[in-house]
Amino acid sequence: MTGTTLLNGSWELRDEILTYDLVNASALSRLDQGWIDQPVPGDIHQGLVAAGRIKEPLLGLNSFDCTWTERRSWWFRKRFQAAEEWQDADVVELEMNGLDSNAEVFLNGDRIGSHRNAFRPFVVDIKSRLRPGENVLLVRLTAGVETVSEADIDAPDGVRAGTEAGNGRPERGEPRRTMVRKPQYSFGWDWSPRVPTTAIAGDVVIRPLKDACIRHVQLVPVREGDQVRVAATVAVDSLHYYKTTEGVVRVTLTDAQGRQHSASRQGLLRSGYNFIELDIPIPDPQLWWPNGLGEQHLYHVEAEVEVNGQVWPYPAFEYGLRFLELLTDGVFAVAVNDEKIFCKGADWIPADTLYARTSGERYDRLIREARDANFTMLRIWGGGLYERDAFYEACDRYGILIWHDFMFACAPYPDHLEWFRTEVTAEAEYQTRRLQRHACIALWSGNNENNWGFRDWWRDQTRGGAWTYNYLLPEVVHRNAPDVPYWNGSPYGGEEPNSSEVGDRHHWHDCMMNPDMEKRITPEEYDKCTSLFVSEFGYIGAPCQDTILTYMDGAPLDQEGATWQHHTNTFEKRTVLAGIKKHYLPTLSGPNELDLDDYVLYSGLCQGLMYSYSLESMRYNPACHGGLFWMYNDCWGEVGWTIIDYCLRRKPAWYFVRRTFAPLRLILRPQGDEIRVVLANDTRSAASFELETGYVSLDGSIADLARRRVEAPPLARTELAVFPRGDHDPLGGLWIARSATPSSILPAIFRATDTCKLRLSEPGLRVSTQRDDQGLRVGVSAERYAHAVHIDLPAGALPEDDYFDLLPGETRWVRVFSAEPVAPETVRVSCVNQS
C-alpha cells in the first residue's frame, strides 16, 4: 500500500455568480476555458494577482478594489491520477484542510459533501467514486456570509457583532461573521483591512488505508516520586466494518542521546475505534522548559499498529515533557514544572491578511525573533485561527508557551443553534486532540473579550456563546488535553470580567484608549496598574521606513491622505504625534511637519518607551505574573501596535522589549523622596553581585554613587536597595542602578522628567570593533550621556542590541549577526543627542 498522496501545488480557479446552480458542477468541471492558475494551500487573491486580475490587496488602496470577490462563487479544480494499488485499500480518504468557506465538494462531477468550518478538516472516503486513471476534484467556496440574513444575526436577542464604523472605517467589520466558522478578522479589524479570505488554506491529502490505522496519540506525563511515566492513549481505527482482528500497538520515545523508552500491547481490535492505553516509564526524564528557564528537550515519538503482519506507522512527532498548572488562589500565574513564572510576551494575530500564504519559514522567523526578544509566551487571539503545525513546532523548539484562545472574539455567538453547537464541538474536539502533543500549549481560553462584553458592552442583553465557554469547551479540554488548564476567556475573573483582583485583565481604558491624551502617552500611568496578569494592552508606532514606502505603493507621504490613513490603526487618533511632542519635540504643531526619517525614529522611540516602562511596571509588581502586550506581529503594513512589522523588520520597540524582558532586569521606581531598586530574576539560579546606585549628571561630572553586595533568589522580584533622591538636579542628571563590575545585567535608569526637558549635550561617542570566530562585535563608548544609540549596518545585518542609552563613561559591546561578513568601515553609530 502506497503512502499519503499530497495534492498541494498548482490547481485551477474560476469564478461564477453566487447563485450558480450546483447541478451544473459536473459540466463546469469539464470546461477547458476560463481557468487561471491557483496555488494550494492558497487564497483566491493570490491566483487573481498572478493572473493580473487584481493588484496586491495589501498595497496602497487596493483592498477596496477587491470587494467584488465577496459577491462571486469560486471554483477550485485539481486533476489527479488514481494509483492502481488504491483498489486494494479498505478506505481511500480525501482530507481537505482549511476550506474557507461554505464548501461544496465534487469528485468526477458527483457531489461528495458540504463543509462549513475552516477550523477542522473535511474528510470523506472516496474509494467507491474513484475512476482508473484521471480524476477531477472540484471545490466551490465563497467568502461565507452571503447566506446569512438580517433575521439570522438579530436572533435570538437583537445583539450584533460590531464594526469599525465608530472609528471611521465603516467597511471594516461584519455583523454576519459570527454565523461563519472562519477567521473573523478577515472582514476587517482596527489593525487589518477588509479582505475576506476565500481559500483552501491547508493541505489536501489522499490517504489509502488497509486493515487499521492510528488516528491519534495522546501523551500525558505523570509524576511518580522522582520518576516520570508517560500515559499514552492510542486511538486505533480497525477498518473492517464487522470483523475483529488481532493487533499490536507500539509507542517509542527517543531522547536526544538516543535512549529509547517503549511500551506495547497486543490484543483484539474491534471494528472502529479502539483506545489502547500504554504506560511508558521515563527513568531519567529530560524536561521541557520555556525560553530562558532551561533547555527545550524534545523526545522523538514513533507509534505503529501491526495487523496481519503488516505495520502501519503513525506520522512521527516531537514531544516535550512538562508539567503545567494554572494558579488562581489569590494569584493568576502559570507554573511550569512546579516553578511559578512571570509570563513575558505579546498577543499573536495571523501573520498575513491572506493567512493561507503564510510559509513555514515565516513562522520560524517570527518565533525566533520572539525567542531572541526574551519572550516566554504568545497568546493566540480568538479572532484569528488555529495555526498550522509549523507554528507550534517552532514554539516547541524555541521555548515559547502558548495561551490559546478558541476562535471566538468580540461578539455574541449563536450557540442556541443546533448546527452551531455541532460545528464548534467538532472543531474543539479536533483542535484539542491535534495540539495536545505540543509542549508549548500552556492554557486553553474560551474566547477574546466576550465575557467582558456580556457585562460592559451588551449590558446583560445576550448570553450568546456563554454555553460554549462555560460548558462545552472545558469538557472538551478536560477530555482531550487533561494536562492543560482551561480558562473561560480573556479577560475573565471576578465580579467584573476585566478585574484587577481576579484572573487576567485587558488594560486598555486606563491608558492607551483613555479619552485623555496625556494618559495615553504618559508611561508612568502604568505604575497604577495592580492587575494579577495583563493579557492585553498596547501602544502604536510606525513601522520601518522601507516598509512604509512599500505599502504606500507610490502614493504621496501625506499623513492626512487616504492611503496613509488606510494604513494607520483606527485607534491611533493622533497619539503618535502627541507622544513625539511630549517626549521629544515640544514645538511640533501637526502632521507632515516631520520628514519620514524623523517620524519613524521618534515614533519608534516613543513606542519603545511606552512598552518598556509598562512591562517593567508589571514585572516590578510582585502580585503580577504576566505582561502580554498587544500585539507582536502584523498581518499587513500599517502604523500600528507591533514590534515586528509586516515585512519582518524590527521596529525600535523590539529592542526596548528585549531589554525589558531580559532574564535579569534591574528596575527603578520612585516612592516619595526615595528610589527603590528591584531585581526581576526570571532564571532558576540565584543572583549575587555588587550593586552601584545613586545619581550621575548627564555630563559625567557628578557621580554620587554607593555600592553594596546584593543577592536575589531565583524566579522572584527582590527589592535590593532603597536610596534617597537627594537634592540633585532632575534636568541635568539621572538616578541609576547597575552592576559595579562587567555583567550581563544592564543598568537601570530613572529619569525624573520627559526626555525633551533634559539638558542633553554632545555625547562624545567612540566606536571600535572586534572580530572573533562568531563574527563582528561593535563597541560604543560615551563621554557623556547618550540617548537612543543606533548602530546602522549594511542591509541583511542585525545588531544584537540597538536604540540603547549609554551612561557617561559607559561602553557597550554589541554582537552583529549577518550571513555575510560585515566590514568595520561600514558600521555607523549615532544617537538622538548627537548633531
Image (tube, grey):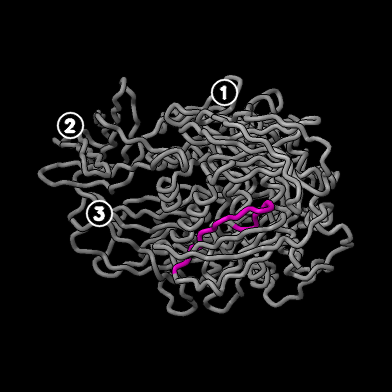
For disc 1, the marked residue is 328
In the figure, is residue 2 to the left or right of 124?
left
Q: Which residue type does callout 1 highlight?
A: Thr
251 displayed left or right of 434: left
Q: Which residues are magenta?
A: 802-819
Q: Which residue is mark 2?
A: 265
Residue 454 in view, yes or no = yes
Q: Please state, as top left, top right, bottom left or bottom right, where the N terminus lies in the image.
A: bottom left
Image mark for residue 614? none
Which secondary structure lies at badge 2? strand
Q: Residue at x 76, y 64 (%)?
A: 565
Q: Dot 3 lies on which element?
A: strand
Residue identifier under label 3: 208
Query: Is residue 805 in the magenta section?
Result: yes
Depth order, front residue of 83/671 = 671
Is residue 735 rendered magenta in the image? no
Q: Name the kind of residue labelled 3 in the image.
A: Pro
